[in-house]
Amino acid sequence: MAGRGHLSDDEITAALDARDEWAVLTTIDADGYPHSVPLGYYQIGRRIYLGTPTGTHKVRNAERNPKASVLVARHKDSGEWSGVLLQGDVTIIRDAEERLQLEREARRQRGVPEAELPSAPRRGEVILGIDPRKTITWRFG
């Protein structure tokens, strides 16, 4: 991935699947200001998932306004300066069975053996699902 410009669809998928950087989730505060936090993430298909404790600022923001963005950027130290910004709507996943299935898939993606996958979802957490409506990419290097 050298040169300037945008990332191809395959490069976007590879960058997001690599999970070698944190994602920065930005939600909109009650007063209209952006609220940004770094989180671990994973994707299934085109949807991005982020786990978080229930009742956090970002969850309250998503309850009020589902519009959000997720930024995954590679820094200059990696030899590349590129990024993917996904803008979309947040769905708050509270259902225990759905969360368990998503948590199991996230661990499978990280190479956890089936015998070591969780049998219950994490207590006190929700999963935020982001359905991208707009994707912005860049590359300098």
Image (tube, grey):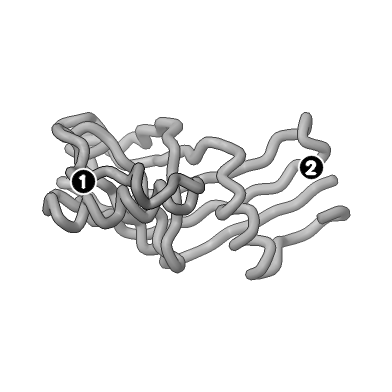
User: Callout 2: 10 Å neighbours few (<14), some, many (20+)?
Assistant: some
Residue 100 at x, y percent in the picture: 22, 51
Task: Looking at this view, name the residue that lies furthest to the front.
Answer: 115
Which label number is shown at residue 60? Answer: none
- Residue at x-position 15% and y-position 55%: 97
Residue 67 at x, y percent in the picture: 31, 53
What residue is shown with label 2? 80
Q: In which quarter of the view is residue 51 placed?
A: top left
- Residue at x-position 48% and y-position 65%: 134
The residue lying toward the viewer, choosing from 30 and 112, is 112
User: Callout 1: 10 Å neighbours few (<14), some, many (20+)?
Assistant: few
Q: Please, is residue 55 above or below residue 68 in the view?
A: above
The residue lying toward the viewer, choosing from 117 and 28, is 117
Q: Earlier in the sequence, mark 2 or mark 1?
A: 2
Residue 95 at x, y percent in the picture: 12, 53
In the rendered image, is residue 9 in sight? Answer: yes
What residue is shown with label 1? 119
- Residue at x-position 77% and y-position 35%: 78
Residue 132 placement, left or right of 32? right
In the rendered image, is residue 69 in sight? Answer: no
Q: Quadrant of the C terminus?
A: top right
Amino acid at pointer 2: Glu
Amino acid at pointer 1: Ser
